Amino acid sequence: MDLIPVILSGGVGSRLWPVSREAHPKPFMTLPDGQNLIQKTFLRAASLKGISQVLTVTNRELLFKTEDEYRSVNTAGLAQGFILEPFGRNTAAAVAMAALQIQGLKGDGAHMLVLAADHLIQDEAAFASAVAKAVSLSSQGWLVTFGVQPQYPETGFGYIEAGDAIGTDEGLKVARFVEKPDLKTAESYLAAGNYFWNAGMFCFQVGTVLEEFAKHAPDVLDAAAASLASSRLTQGDAYHCLAVDADSFAKVPDISIDYALMERSDRVATVPCDIGWSDIGSWNAVSELTARDDNGNRFEGEVLSHGSRNNYVNSEDRLTALVGVEDLLVVDTPDALMIAHKDHAQDVKHIVGQLKSSGHTLHLLHRTVHRPWGTYTTLENGDRFKIKRIVVKPKASLSLQLHHHRSEHWIVVSGMATVVNGDKEFMLNTNESTFIRAGHQHRLSNPGVIDLVLIEVQSGDYVGEDDIVRLEDIYGRAK
Protein backbone atom coordinates (compact mmCIF):
# COMPACT_ATOMS: atom_id res chain seq x y z
CA MET A 1 0.00 0.00 0.00
CA ASP A 2 1.28 3.46 -0.92
CA LEU A 3 0.62 6.31 1.54
CA ILE A 4 1.72 9.75 0.33
CA PRO A 5 1.68 12.62 2.85
CA VAL A 6 0.56 15.88 1.21
CA ILE A 7 1.66 19.01 3.08
CA LEU A 8 -0.35 22.14 2.32
CA SER A 9 1.84 25.19 2.92
CA GLY A 10 -0.04 28.40 2.27
CA GLY A 11 -1.59 31.29 4.15
CA VAL A 12 0.04 34.14 6.01
CA GLY A 13 -0.62 33.67 9.73
CA SER A 14 -1.47 37.34 10.23
CA ARG A 15 -2.39 36.80 13.89
CA LEU A 16 1.28 35.95 14.52
CA TRP A 17 2.68 39.20 13.16
CA PRO A 18 5.37 40.57 13.45
CA VAL A 19 7.22 37.22 13.26
CA SER A 20 4.92 35.76 10.61
CA ARG A 21 4.86 37.78 7.37
CA GLU A 22 3.83 37.00 3.81
CA ALA A 23 7.40 36.23 2.70
CA HIS A 24 8.14 34.38 5.96
CA PRO A 25 4.79 32.89 7.05
CA LYS A 26 3.80 30.87 10.10
CA PRO A 27 5.20 27.45 8.95
CA PHE A 28 8.71 28.94 9.13
CA MET A 29 8.42 30.34 12.65
CA THR A 30 11.05 28.83 14.93
CA LEU A 31 9.58 27.36 18.11
CA PRO A 32 11.34 27.22 21.50
CA ASP A 33 12.86 23.80 20.71
CA GLY A 34 14.69 25.23 17.67
CA GLN A 35 12.56 23.63 14.94
CA ASN A 36 9.88 25.36 12.90
CA LEU A 37 6.40 24.07 12.12
CA ILE A 38 7.07 22.94 8.55
CA GLN A 39 10.08 20.91 9.69
CA LYS A 40 7.97 19.29 12.39
CA THR A 41 5.24 18.48 9.88
CA PHE A 42 7.75 16.93 7.48
CA LEU A 43 9.32 14.82 10.25
CA ARG A 44 5.92 13.73 11.52
CA ALA A 45 4.95 12.58 8.04
CA ALA A 46 8.33 10.93 7.41
CA SER A 47 8.13 8.93 10.64
CA LEU A 48 4.97 7.07 9.57
CA LYS A 49 5.38 3.45 8.54
CA GLY A 50 6.11 2.83 4.87
CA ILE A 51 6.56 6.46 3.78
CA SER A 52 8.95 6.85 0.83
CA GLN A 53 8.05 10.33 -0.42
CA VAL A 54 6.36 13.56 0.62
CA LEU A 55 4.41 15.92 -1.67
CA THR A 56 4.16 19.62 -0.76
CA VAL A 57 1.76 22.16 -2.27
CA THR A 58 3.18 25.68 -1.87
CA ASN A 59 4.16 28.67 -4.02
CA ARG A 60 7.27 29.60 -5.97
CA GLU A 61 8.36 32.27 -3.50
CA LEU A 62 8.53 29.72 -0.69
CA LEU A 63 9.92 26.77 -2.67
CA PHE A 64 13.62 27.30 -2.04
CA LYS A 65 13.18 28.13 1.63
CA THR A 66 11.02 25.00 2.02
CA GLU A 67 13.71 22.91 0.34
CA ASP A 68 16.30 24.33 2.73
CA GLU A 69 14.15 23.52 5.76
CA TYR A 70 13.47 19.97 4.56
CA ARG A 71 17.12 19.40 3.67
CA SER A 72 18.19 20.10 7.24
CA VAL A 73 15.92 17.37 8.68
CA ASN A 74 15.53 14.85 5.81
CA THR A 75 18.20 12.49 7.09
CA ALA A 76 16.40 9.47 5.61
CA GLY A 77 16.64 10.91 2.10
CA LEU A 78 12.90 10.73 1.36
CA ALA A 79 11.85 11.62 -2.16
CA GLN A 80 10.26 15.05 -2.44
CA GLY A 81 7.64 16.42 -4.78
CA PHE A 82 6.29 19.94 -5.08
CA ILE A 83 3.27 21.54 -6.71
CA LEU A 84 3.83 25.29 -7.03
CA GLU A 85 0.70 27.43 -7.12
CA PRO A 86 1.12 30.84 -8.78
CA PHE A 87 -1.25 32.34 -6.18
CA GLY A 88 -3.56 31.11 -3.42
CA ARG A 89 -6.72 29.33 -4.53
CA ASN A 90 -7.91 27.66 -1.30
CA THR A 91 -7.67 24.00 -0.30
CA ALA A 92 -10.00 22.30 -2.80
CA ALA A 93 -7.69 23.20 -5.68
CA ALA A 94 -4.61 22.05 -3.76
CA VAL A 95 -6.15 18.69 -2.80
CA ALA A 96 -7.50 18.04 -6.31
CA MET A 97 -4.14 18.74 -7.97
CA ALA A 98 -2.32 16.59 -5.41
CA ALA A 99 -4.77 13.72 -5.97
CA LEU A 100 -4.33 13.91 -9.73
CA GLN A 101 -0.56 14.02 -9.39
CA ILE A 102 -0.52 10.97 -7.08
CA GLN A 103 -2.90 9.13 -9.40
CA GLY A 104 -0.40 9.61 -12.22
CA LEU A 105 2.47 8.38 -10.06
CA LYS A 106 0.88 5.58 -8.03
CA GLY A 107 -2.61 4.86 -9.42
CA ASP A 108 -6.09 4.97 -7.89
CA GLY A 109 -5.21 2.61 -5.03
CA ALA A 110 -2.73 4.96 -3.37
CA HIS A 111 -3.70 6.80 -0.21
CA MET A 112 -3.03 10.48 0.47
CA LEU A 113 -2.70 11.99 3.92
CA VAL A 114 -3.41 15.74 3.82
CA LEU A 115 -1.62 17.78 6.51
CA ALA A 116 -1.33 21.49 7.22
CA ALA A 117 2.24 22.79 7.35
CA ASP A 118 1.57 25.10 10.29
CA HIS A 119 -0.06 22.86 12.90
CA LEU A 120 1.60 21.36 15.97
CA ILE A 121 1.00 17.77 17.13
CA GLN A 122 2.74 16.83 20.35
CA ASP A 123 1.67 13.18 20.77
CA GLU A 124 3.16 11.58 17.67
CA ALA A 125 2.42 8.01 18.79
CA ALA A 126 -1.27 8.85 19.06
CA PHE A 127 -1.07 10.59 15.68
CA ALA A 128 0.46 7.49 14.03
CA SER A 129 -2.30 5.34 15.56
CA ALA A 130 -4.98 7.71 14.24
CA VAL A 131 -3.41 7.64 10.76
CA ALA A 132 -3.47 3.82 10.75
CA LYS A 133 -7.19 3.88 11.55
CA ALA A 134 -7.80 6.51 8.87
CA VAL A 135 -6.00 4.43 6.23
CA SER A 136 -8.12 1.41 7.17
CA LEU A 137 -11.30 3.44 6.75
CA SER A 138 -10.16 5.05 3.50
CA SER A 139 -9.46 1.56 2.13
CA GLN A 140 -13.19 0.92 2.60
CA GLY A 141 -14.13 3.94 0.49
CA TRP A 142 -14.49 6.61 3.17
CA LEU A 143 -13.24 10.17 3.01
CA VAL A 144 -11.68 10.46 6.45
CA THR A 145 -11.25 13.51 8.66
CA PHE A 146 -9.43 13.70 11.98
CA GLY A 147 -11.71 14.88 14.79
CA VAL A 148 -9.65 16.29 17.64
CA GLN A 149 -11.07 15.70 21.11
CA PRO A 150 -11.98 19.19 22.39
CA GLN A 151 -10.28 20.25 25.61
CA TYR A 152 -12.40 23.36 26.26
CA PRO A 153 -15.28 25.24 24.57
CA GLU A 154 -13.25 26.84 21.76
CA THR A 155 -15.09 29.41 19.61
CA GLY A 156 -12.31 29.81 17.05
CA PHE A 157 -12.57 26.33 15.45
CA GLY A 158 -15.12 24.60 13.29
CA TYR A 159 -16.58 21.38 14.70
CA ILE A 160 -17.49 17.91 13.42
CA GLU A 161 -20.67 16.29 14.72
CA ALA A 162 -20.12 12.54 14.78
CA GLY A 163 -22.82 9.96 14.22
CA ASP A 164 -22.87 6.16 14.24
CA ALA A 165 -19.81 3.96 14.60
CA ILE A 166 -18.33 2.32 11.49
CA GLY A 167 -17.39 -1.32 11.99
CA THR A 168 -14.60 -2.05 14.44
CA ASP A 169 -12.11 0.54 13.20
CA GLU A 170 -13.10 3.15 15.79
CA GLY A 171 -14.28 5.48 13.06
CA LEU A 172 -17.54 7.40 13.21
CA LYS A 173 -19.74 8.54 10.37
CA VAL A 174 -19.87 12.33 10.09
CA ALA A 175 -23.36 13.69 10.70
CA ARG A 176 -22.46 17.27 9.78
CA PHE A 177 -19.81 19.98 9.86
CA VAL A 178 -20.61 23.10 11.88
CA GLU A 179 -19.13 26.58 11.71
CA LYS A 180 -17.29 28.34 14.52
CA PRO A 181 -19.86 28.56 17.36
CA ASP A 182 -20.51 31.18 20.01
CA LEU A 183 -19.44 30.34 23.57
CA LYS A 184 -22.78 28.95 24.71
CA THR A 185 -22.99 26.65 21.69
CA ALA A 186 -19.38 25.54 22.13
CA GLU A 187 -20.13 24.65 25.75
CA SER A 188 -23.09 22.53 24.62
CA TYR A 189 -20.84 20.75 22.09
CA LEU A 190 -18.33 19.94 24.78
CA ALA A 191 -21.05 18.58 27.06
CA ALA A 192 -22.61 16.48 24.28
CA GLY A 193 -19.45 14.43 23.79
CA ASN A 194 -19.91 13.70 20.07
CA TYR A 195 -18.49 16.96 18.73
CA PHE A 196 -14.85 17.26 17.73
CA TRP A 197 -12.59 20.07 16.55
CA ASN A 198 -12.15 20.04 12.79
CA ALA A 199 -8.35 19.95 12.45
CA GLY A 200 -8.29 20.24 8.66
CA MET A 201 -6.43 16.92 8.19
CA PHE A 202 -7.73 14.24 5.84
CA CYS A 203 -7.01 10.77 4.50
CA PHE A 204 -8.38 9.49 1.17
CA GLN A 205 -7.80 6.77 -1.34
CA VAL A 206 -7.00 8.64 -4.54
CA GLY A 207 -9.61 6.93 -6.68
CA THR A 208 -12.32 7.62 -4.10
CA VAL A 209 -11.61 11.33 -3.66
CA LEU A 210 -11.43 11.87 -7.42
CA GLU A 211 -14.77 10.10 -7.84
CA GLU A 212 -16.30 12.38 -5.21
CA PHE A 213 -14.79 15.46 -6.85
CA ALA A 214 -16.33 14.38 -10.17
CA LYS A 215 -19.69 13.96 -8.46
CA HIS A 216 -19.82 17.01 -6.18
CA ALA A 217 -17.28 19.51 -7.55
CA PRO A 218 -16.60 18.70 -11.22
CA ASP A 219 -15.70 22.33 -11.95
CA VAL A 220 -12.86 22.15 -9.43
CA LEU A 221 -11.62 18.83 -10.77
CA ASP A 222 -11.74 19.83 -14.43
CA ALA A 223 -9.97 23.14 -13.84
CA ALA A 224 -7.34 21.49 -11.65
CA ALA A 225 -6.67 18.87 -14.32
CA ALA A 226 -6.34 21.58 -16.97
CA SER A 227 -3.90 23.47 -14.75
CA LEU A 228 -1.69 20.42 -14.29
CA ALA A 229 -1.79 19.59 -17.99
CA SER A 230 -0.32 23.00 -18.85
CA SER A 231 2.20 23.07 -15.99
CA ARG A 232 5.98 22.87 -16.30
CA LEU A 233 7.66 19.79 -14.82
CA THR A 234 11.17 19.67 -13.40
CA GLN A 235 12.40 16.31 -12.14
CA GLY A 236 15.48 14.44 -11.10
CA ASP A 237 16.49 11.62 -8.80
CA ALA A 238 14.00 11.49 -5.89
CA TYR A 239 12.62 14.91 -6.86
CA HIS A 240 9.87 16.37 -9.01
CA CYS A 241 8.36 19.84 -9.16
CA LEU A 242 5.30 21.06 -11.07
CA ALA A 243 5.06 24.82 -11.64
CA VAL A 244 1.34 25.41 -12.25
CA ASP A 245 0.34 27.60 -15.20
CA ALA A 246 -1.17 30.85 -13.90
CA ASP A 247 -3.74 31.40 -16.66
CA SER A 248 -5.22 27.92 -16.23
CA PHE A 249 -5.07 28.09 -12.44
CA ALA A 250 -7.04 31.34 -12.38
CA LYS A 251 -10.06 29.36 -13.65
CA VAL A 252 -10.07 26.99 -10.65
CA PRO A 253 -12.92 27.89 -8.23
CA ASP A 254 -11.68 29.49 -5.01
CA ILE A 255 -13.30 27.17 -2.45
CA SER A 256 -12.24 25.08 0.51
CA ILE A 257 -12.19 21.28 0.49
CA ASP A 258 -14.81 21.36 3.28
CA TYR A 259 -17.32 23.33 1.22
CA ALA A 260 -16.51 21.74 -2.13
CA LEU A 261 -16.52 18.12 -1.06
CA MET A 262 -16.63 17.10 2.60
CA GLU A 263 -19.96 18.78 3.39
CA ARG A 264 -21.58 17.38 0.24
CA SER A 265 -20.42 13.77 0.24
CA ASP A 266 -22.23 10.97 2.08
CA ARG A 267 -19.00 8.98 2.39
CA VAL A 268 -17.33 11.04 5.14
CA ALA A 269 -16.02 9.51 8.36
CA THR A 270 -14.01 10.86 11.25
CA VAL A 271 -11.35 9.31 13.45
CA PRO A 272 -11.64 10.81 16.96
CA CYS A 273 -8.20 11.44 18.39
CA ASP A 274 -6.38 13.10 21.27
CA ILE A 275 -3.00 13.94 19.74
CA GLY A 276 -1.91 17.16 21.46
CA TRP A 277 -3.05 19.21 18.45
CA SER A 278 -2.86 22.98 18.12
CA ASP A 279 -3.21 25.20 15.09
CA ILE A 280 -0.85 27.72 16.76
CA GLY A 281 -3.39 30.34 15.76
CA SER A 282 -2.35 33.18 18.07
CA TRP A 283 0.42 34.39 20.35
CA ASN A 284 -1.52 32.92 23.28
CA ALA A 285 -1.07 29.47 21.69
CA VAL A 286 2.63 30.12 21.06
CA SER A 287 3.13 31.22 24.66
CA GLU A 288 1.86 27.86 25.94
CA LEU A 289 5.02 26.22 24.52
CA THR A 290 7.21 28.07 27.05
CA ALA A 291 7.41 27.22 30.76
CA ARG A 292 5.90 29.68 33.28
CA ASP A 293 7.78 31.25 36.13
CA ASP A 294 6.33 31.68 39.64
CA ASN A 295 4.42 34.77 38.53
CA GLY A 296 2.88 33.13 35.49
CA ASN A 297 5.22 34.89 33.06
CA ARG A 298 6.60 33.13 29.98
CA PHE A 299 9.78 34.58 28.49
CA GLU A 300 11.79 33.96 25.32
CA GLY A 301 15.04 35.90 25.31
CA GLU A 302 16.61 38.15 27.95
CA VAL A 303 13.81 39.62 30.08
CA LEU A 304 13.81 41.42 33.44
CA SER A 305 10.56 41.64 35.37
CA HIS A 306 9.41 43.49 38.48
CA GLY A 307 5.89 43.22 39.83
CA SER A 308 4.60 41.77 36.56
CA ARG A 309 2.34 38.75 36.14
CA ASN A 310 0.96 36.48 33.43
CA ASN A 311 2.86 38.08 30.54
CA TYR A 312 4.49 36.57 27.48
CA VAL A 313 7.61 38.15 25.98
CA ASN A 314 9.39 37.04 22.80
CA SER A 315 12.49 39.22 22.43
CA GLU A 316 15.56 37.46 21.08
CA ASP A 317 17.66 40.46 20.00
CA ARG A 318 17.65 42.80 23.00
CA LEU A 319 16.82 43.00 26.68
CA THR A 320 13.19 43.68 27.56
CA ALA A 321 12.07 44.99 30.97
CA LEU A 322 8.56 44.67 32.41
CA VAL A 323 7.47 46.75 35.40
CA GLY A 324 4.07 46.37 37.04
CA VAL A 325 2.16 45.04 34.04
CA GLU A 326 -0.13 42.05 33.62
CA ASP A 327 -1.62 39.89 30.85
CA LEU A 328 0.45 41.34 28.01
CA LEU A 329 1.84 39.81 24.84
CA VAL A 330 5.12 41.47 23.83
CA VAL A 331 6.79 40.35 20.58
CA ASP A 332 9.92 42.21 19.50
CA THR A 333 11.68 41.81 16.14
CA PRO A 334 14.48 43.92 14.63
CA ASP A 335 12.03 46.13 12.74
CA ALA A 336 8.71 45.92 14.60
CA LEU A 337 7.38 45.70 18.16
CA MET A 338 3.91 44.34 18.94
CA ILE A 339 2.23 44.78 22.34
CA ALA A 340 -1.25 43.37 22.92
CA HIS A 341 -3.48 42.36 25.78
CA LYS A 342 -3.93 38.60 25.94
CA ASP A 343 -7.69 38.98 25.58
CA HIS A 344 -7.14 40.61 22.17
CA ALA A 345 -4.61 38.17 20.69
CA GLN A 346 -6.92 37.45 17.75
CA ASP A 347 -7.01 41.13 16.82
CA VAL A 348 -3.35 41.32 15.79
CA LYS A 349 -4.49 40.57 12.24
CA HIS A 350 -6.11 44.02 12.09
CA ILE A 351 -2.68 45.63 12.39
CA VAL A 352 -1.60 43.61 9.34
CA GLY A 353 -4.66 44.95 7.52
CA GLN A 354 -3.64 48.51 8.37
CA LEU A 355 -0.10 47.88 7.11
CA LYS A 356 -1.45 46.54 3.82
CA SER A 357 -3.89 49.39 3.28
CA SER A 358 -1.17 51.97 3.94
CA GLY A 359 1.28 50.31 1.57
CA HIS A 360 3.77 49.54 4.34
CA THR A 361 6.13 46.66 3.56
CA LEU A 362 6.31 45.27 7.12
CA HIS A 363 3.34 42.98 6.46
CA LEU A 364 5.40 41.36 3.70
CA LEU A 365 9.09 41.29 4.56
CA HIS A 366 11.43 41.09 7.52
CA ARG A 367 14.61 43.11 7.66
CA THR A 368 16.36 39.86 6.70
CA VAL A 369 14.86 38.40 3.52
CA HIS A 370 15.45 34.84 2.28
CA ARG A 371 16.18 34.23 -1.38
CA PRO A 372 17.02 31.01 -3.30
CA TRP A 373 20.70 31.98 -3.24
CA GLY A 374 20.90 33.09 0.41
CA THR A 375 19.75 36.18 2.35
CA TYR A 376 19.97 39.94 2.42
CA THR A 377 19.55 42.18 5.47
CA THR A 378 18.66 45.85 5.13
CA LEU A 379 20.99 47.72 7.48
CA GLU A 380 19.84 51.23 6.63
CA ASN A 381 17.30 52.70 4.23
CA GLY A 382 17.47 56.44 3.62
CA ASP A 383 16.58 59.07 1.05
CA ARG A 384 18.19 57.93 -2.23
CA PHE A 385 20.33 55.22 -0.62
CA LYS A 386 20.12 51.75 0.95
CA ILE A 387 22.75 49.60 2.67
CA LYS A 388 22.47 45.79 2.70
CA ARG A 389 24.38 42.83 4.09
CA ILE A 390 24.24 40.05 1.48
CA VAL A 391 25.04 36.38 2.15
CA VAL A 392 25.37 34.05 -0.84
CA LYS A 393 25.44 30.30 -0.22
CA PRO A 394 28.29 28.20 -1.65
CA LYS A 395 27.90 27.49 -5.40
CA ALA A 396 24.84 29.81 -5.53
CA SER A 397 24.31 32.71 -7.90
CA LEU A 398 22.08 35.75 -8.14
CA SER A 399 20.32 36.42 -11.43
CA LEU A 400 21.94 38.28 -14.31
CA GLN A 401 20.13 41.59 -13.87
CA LEU A 402 20.15 45.34 -14.24
CA HIS A 403 18.60 48.34 -12.49
CA HIS A 404 17.29 51.46 -14.18
CA HIS A 405 17.35 53.86 -11.24
CA ARG A 406 20.23 52.90 -8.97
CA SER A 407 23.93 52.12 -8.96
CA GLU A 408 25.55 49.64 -6.55
CA HIS A 409 28.87 49.32 -4.78
CA TRP A 410 29.86 45.84 -3.54
CA ILE A 411 32.49 45.28 -0.83
CA VAL A 412 33.43 41.67 -0.01
CA VAL A 413 33.60 41.08 3.76
CA SER A 414 34.42 37.37 3.69
CA GLY A 415 34.62 34.63 1.10
CA MET A 416 35.19 34.96 -2.62
CA ALA A 417 32.93 36.36 -5.36
CA THR A 418 32.66 35.90 -9.09
CA VAL A 419 31.31 39.13 -10.57
CA VAL A 420 29.84 39.97 -13.96
CA ASN A 421 29.90 43.75 -14.40
CA GLY A 422 28.92 44.93 -17.86
CA ASP A 423 31.02 42.99 -20.38
CA LYS A 424 33.66 41.98 -17.81
CA GLU A 425 33.87 38.93 -15.51
CA PHE A 426 36.35 38.82 -12.64
CA MET A 427 37.01 37.59 -9.09
CA LEU A 428 36.76 39.61 -5.88
CA ASN A 429 38.47 38.54 -2.66
CA THR A 430 37.98 39.77 0.90
CA ASN A 431 38.37 43.57 1.25
CA GLU A 432 38.02 44.11 -2.53
CA SER A 433 35.14 45.95 -4.17
CA THR A 434 33.47 46.91 -7.46
CA PHE A 435 31.12 49.64 -8.64
CA ILE A 436 28.12 48.86 -10.88
CA ARG A 437 26.53 51.71 -12.79
CA ALA A 438 22.80 52.01 -13.31
CA GLY A 439 21.76 50.21 -16.49
CA HIS A 440 24.76 47.83 -16.48
CA GLN A 441 23.96 44.12 -16.45
CA HIS A 442 25.60 42.34 -13.53
CA ARG A 443 25.66 39.06 -11.64
CA LEU A 444 27.09 37.92 -8.30
CA SER A 445 28.09 34.28 -7.68
CA ASN A 446 29.84 32.35 -4.92
CA PRO A 447 32.32 29.83 -6.38
CA GLY A 448 33.63 28.84 -2.95
CA VAL A 449 32.73 26.32 -0.25
CA ILE A 450 31.91 28.86 2.50
CA ASP A 451 29.34 31.65 2.57
CA LEU A 452 30.14 34.80 0.62
CA VAL A 453 29.37 37.90 2.73
CA LEU A 454 29.41 41.39 1.27
CA ILE A 455 28.08 44.88 1.91
CA GLU A 456 26.03 46.46 -0.85
CA VAL A 457 25.54 50.23 -0.99
CA GLN A 458 22.76 51.33 -3.35
CA SER A 459 22.33 54.94 -4.46
CA GLY A 460 19.99 56.60 -6.93
CA ASP A 461 16.69 58.36 -7.34
CA TYR A 462 14.81 55.13 -6.51
CA VAL A 463 16.06 52.14 -4.47
CA GLY A 464 12.91 50.01 -4.28
CA GLU A 465 13.11 46.22 -4.60
CA ASP A 466 10.99 46.28 -7.76
CA ASP A 467 13.66 48.12 -9.76
CA ILE A 468 15.13 44.91 -11.10
CA VAL A 469 15.15 43.40 -14.59
CA ARG A 470 16.19 39.73 -14.54
CA LEU A 471 17.85 38.67 -17.78
CA GLU A 472 18.89 35.12 -16.78
CA ASP A 473 18.21 33.16 -13.63
CA ILE A 474 19.05 29.59 -12.61
CA TYR A 475 16.00 29.56 -10.30
CA GLY A 476 13.48 30.24 -13.05
CA ARG A 477 12.59 33.79 -11.96
CA ALA A 478 13.50 35.56 -15.21
CA LYS A 479 10.50 36.44 -17.37
Image: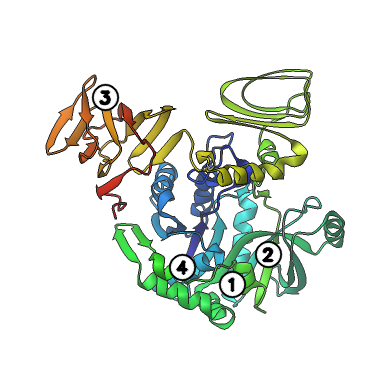
For the residues marked 1 and 3, what is the alpha-carbon distance in whole angstroms? 57 Å
**Depicted 291 relative to depicted 85: above or below:** above
Residue 83 or residue 404, whichever sits in front: 404
Which residue in the structure is indicated by mark 3? 412
Residue 64 or residue 15, whichever sits in front: 15
For the residues marked 4 and 2, what is the alpha-carbon distance in whole angstroms? 34 Å
For the residues marked 1 and 2, what is the alpha-carbon distance in whole angstroms? 11 Å
Extreme bottom residue here?
A: 215
Q: Residues within 10 Å of mark 2 (few under 14, many from 20)?
A: many
Residue 151 or residue 299, whichever sits in front: 299
Q: Amino acid at mark 3?
A: Val
Which residue in the structure is indicated by mark 4? 250
Q: Residues within 10 Å of mark 1 (few under 14, many from 20)?
A: many
Q: Secondary structure at mark 4?
A: loop
Nearest to N terminus: mark 1 or mark 4: 1
For the residues marked 4 and 3, what is the alpha-carbon distance in whole angstroms? 44 Å
Which residue in the structure is indicated by mark 1? 138
Quarter placement of the C terminus: bottom left
Depth check, mark 1 against mark 3: the one in front is 3
The x and y percentages for residue 238 are 34, 57
The x and y percentages for residue 92 are 55, 68
For the residues marked 3 and 2, what is the alpha-carbon distance in whole angstroms? 57 Å
The x and y percentages for residue 231 are 35, 67
Depth check, mark 1 against mark 4: the one in front is 4
Q: Which mark, residue 271? A: 2
Q: Residues within 10 Å of mark 3 (few under 14, many from 20)?
A: many
